[in-house]
Image (tube, grey):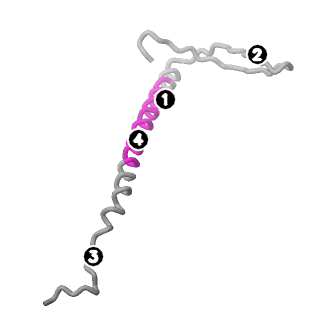
């Protein structure tokens, strides 16, 4: 949240109607300042965890691409010319 933003906490109720629509009812909740501070701190932690999760996902994707590159090169590096046991080079 920026400094110009504010949050209003509400208790919500969603009532289904017979025609498939729904009625939304919200009532503003006034929290004491200590509870409001805890709620704001928890919301900040959730945002940080979301950012950390995205960063971790990017790192994992990059590692997967790197490993796929290694795996693509692996068959080439294992095809080393071995000496022919039936061909004698001794004089």
Residue that appears at 51% across and 20% down? 36
User: Mark 4 against mark 2, which lies toward the viewer?
Assistant: 4
Judge the density around disc 4: few (<14), some (14-19), many (≥20) Cα neighbours within 10 Å.
few
Q: Which residue is mark 2?
A: 23
Q: What SS does tag 3 mark?
A: loop
Mark nearer the viewer, 2 or 1: 2
Residue lying furthest top: 4
Lower sequence index among marks 4 and 2: 2
Between 7 and 23, the one nearer to me in the picture: 23
Determine which of the numbered discs, if any, sits on residue 16 in the image: none
Distance of mark 1 from mark 3, alpha carbons? Answer: 63 Å
* Residue at position x 54%, y 18% in the image: 32
Label disc, if present, on residue 56 of the rendered structure: 4
Taking depth in this image into account, of 77 and 66 the one nearest to the observer is 77
Gap in angstroms between the C-alphas marked 3 and 4: 43 Å
Q: Looking at the image, which residue is at 38% across and 57% down?
A: 71
Secondary structure mostly seen in the magenta stretch = helix
The residue that label 1 is drawn on is: 42
Q: Residue furthest bottom?
A: 91
Instruction: Look at the numbered disc 1 and give the secondary structure of its residue.
Output: helix
Is 78 magenta? The answer is: no
Q: Is residue 84 above or below residue 22?
A: below
In magenta, the rendered stretch is 40-65
Of the residues under marks 2 and 3, which one precedes in the sequence?
A: 2
Whether label 2 touches label 3, CB < 8 Å = no
The x, y position of residue 17, in whole percent, is 83, 19
Look at mark 3 in the image and give the residue it sits on.
82
């Amino acid at each position: 949240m920026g400094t110009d933003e504010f949050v209003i906490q509400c208790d919500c109720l969603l009532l289904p109607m017979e025609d498939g629509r729904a009625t939304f009812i919200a009532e503003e909740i006034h929290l004491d300042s200590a509870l409001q501070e805890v709620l704001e701190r928890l919301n900040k932690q959730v945002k940080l965890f979301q950012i950390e999760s995205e960063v971790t996902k990017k790192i994992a994707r990059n590692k997967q691409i790197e490993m796929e590159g290694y795996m693509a090169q692996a068959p080439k590096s294992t095809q080393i010319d071995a000496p022919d046991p039936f061909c004698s080079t001794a004089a």
